[in-house]
Amino acid sequence: MAAYSLDKALILDRLGDDEEIFTMMVDMYLQDVENNCTSLSSLLAAGDQPSLQREAHTIKGLLATFADDEGTAMAAALEMRVKMGDLSDLAPAIAALQARLREVSVVLQAAIAG
């Protein structure tokens, strides 16, 4: 899997070139990323299929917002597996998605700091 690379121009284009909205969305992402990661693990441990599906869907949207096609595909695949009732051996897919979420957060943090 390729490392996440921020395409700020593409994201800004999608946001109507609004730098303020971009910064606000990055801030929200950074505030919520650990909650998203924890939620994935907790919901899997609880076997809460509907909530796990919703969380994967939410993460898919978050990563799509930041033009992370690979991360979006990972979240979509997880969402589909859960939707189909396949909760077996999801831990590796969840761990990979959590790592991707954290990777994106590091890149975004650097972007707003620099």
Image (cartoon, helix red, strand yellow):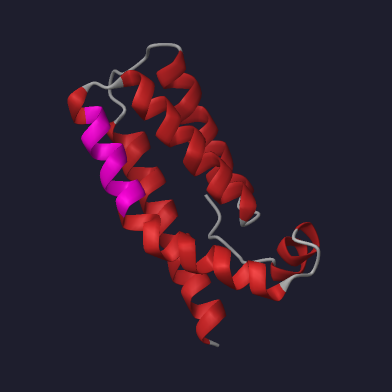
As for residue 41 lying within the magenta part, the answer is yes
Residue furthest top in the image: 85
Residue at 22 percent of width and 36 percent of height: 42
- Judged left or right of residue 92, residue 82 is right
Residue at 25 percent of width and 29 percent of height: 44
- Judged left or right of residue 81, residue 21 is right
Residue at 69 percent of width and 66 percent of height: 7
Q: Position of residue 105 (x, y in %)?
A: 45, 65
Q: Is residue 45 above or below residue 60?
A: above
Q: Position of residue 70 (x, y in %)?
A: 58, 46
Pick the quarter of the image with the C terminus.
bottom right
Which residues lie in the magenta part?
A: 35-44
- Judged left or right of residue 15, residue 20 is left
- Judged left or right of residue 91, residue 4 is right
Residue at 60 percent of width and 65 percent of height: 5
Q: Is residue 19 above or below residue 88?
A: below
Q: Position of residue 57 (x, y in %)?
A: 50, 33
Q: Locate residue 83: give its quadrant.
A: top left
Q: Position of residue 93 (x, y in %)?
A: 37, 35
Q: Is residue 60 above or below residue 32?
A: above
Q: How many marks?
A: 0
Q: Main secondary structure of the magenta part?
A: helix
